[in-house]
Amino acid sequence: MKKIFIGIDFAKEKFDAAIIEACGLKEFGERQFGTFINSKKGYSQFMKWVKAKAVSTTEQEWLFCGEDTGSCSLGLSKWLYGKGLDIWIENAYSIKHSSGIQRLKTDRADASMIAEYAWRHQDKAMLFEPLSESLTQLREVFLYRHKLVQQRVAMDVRKQDKETAQSSKAISFINRKSKHLITEIDKAIKECDMMIDRIIDADTELKDNYSIITSVKGVARQNGACLLIFTNNFKRFDMDARKIACYYGVAPFGKDSGSSIHTPAKTSHFANKLIKSLLSQAAQIAKIFNPEIKDYYESLIKRGKKHSVALNNVKNKLLRIIVALVKKKVKYDPETYKFYRNRLEKQFSLV
């Protein structure tokens, strides 16, 4: 059981920390606070401070906890993980909405709130594990490619607006430069695609799972890389398709309380919009070119489902298929689907 809970409130230049010593439901002594530079030098000073304040305990009895703030929290998280210490990086929304009413808003108060969250919910702790070197590189290239695509779309829209405007020297200059920049961005996107392929091919584990994912018709390079990155090559979410669907924002949830609240199941707006949009593209393609998905989608429409609802069901089905295939370490086989469909048709014809 943990006895020392260290809450960390990350910022770009510094981080604030709070220490709570507790056992079970009982807290001992006063809470300790400190502020440190968010750099390796600050990490060392932070560790000396924790050791001085937690002198009566061992490192195995410590639990560090912080909010997931992207690059701000990544440096210290990796450093503590490298030292063999337990660190829990939690969603900021979960911490805020499970800590009651907070009237005071300071970095010190936030660090104390995070430490208390770690103490109260230590049984739910999911310890931080950094991405492998291959996945880290893949993530950087994947996100860079996404930014390039956004820039290309913005540039293309700008060019189209100017093409419809009255011609002049300035408009001609803008159109010429826009075409040149779009061409350069297209080249950079192709280079990113080649880099993604090289990174995956160089890692056996990534390559095996990537080949399984992309064997499903409708799921291509970007969705394959996306799944590998955001599931940590399927090490996150316990190989649970429902949990992955929740993270993608495609798992529907309803509300049912008392006699007046009966809300139909809907997807939540709490989701990673980038990966949700990529999955939407895969679903749109799969419902046209993948026979299994096409039949499934059409059956939903015939039952009276709206297009948006049927498409969301397709997204969930794709994730369930992919997770099942990765578990079994087998590629998608359309003939298997034909076998089950034919057997089902025979059963109905005999009735």
Image (cartoon, rainbow, N blue to C red):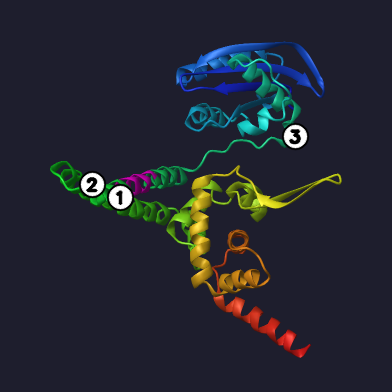
Q: Amino acid at mark 2?
A: Ser
Q: CA distance from mark 2 to mark 3?
A: 55 Å
Image depth: mark 2 or mark 3 in front: 2
* Callout 2–callout 1 Cβ contact below 8 Å: yes
180 left or right, relative to 14: left
Residue 227: x %, y % from top left: 52, 52
Please give the label number shown on residue 156.
Answer: 1
Tell me the element at label 1.
Answer: helix
Please give the label number shown on residue 123.
Answer: 3
Can you say which quadrant of the picture contains the C terminus?
bottom right
Residue receiving disc 2: 178
Residue 12 visible in the current orientation:
yes
Q: Amino acid at mark 3?
A: Asp
Q: Residues within 10 Å of mark 3 (few under 14, many from 20)?
A: few
Residue drawn where x is 71% and y is 14% of the image: 56
Q: Main secondary structure of the magenta part?
A: helix
Of mark 2 and mark 1, the one earlier in the sequence is 1
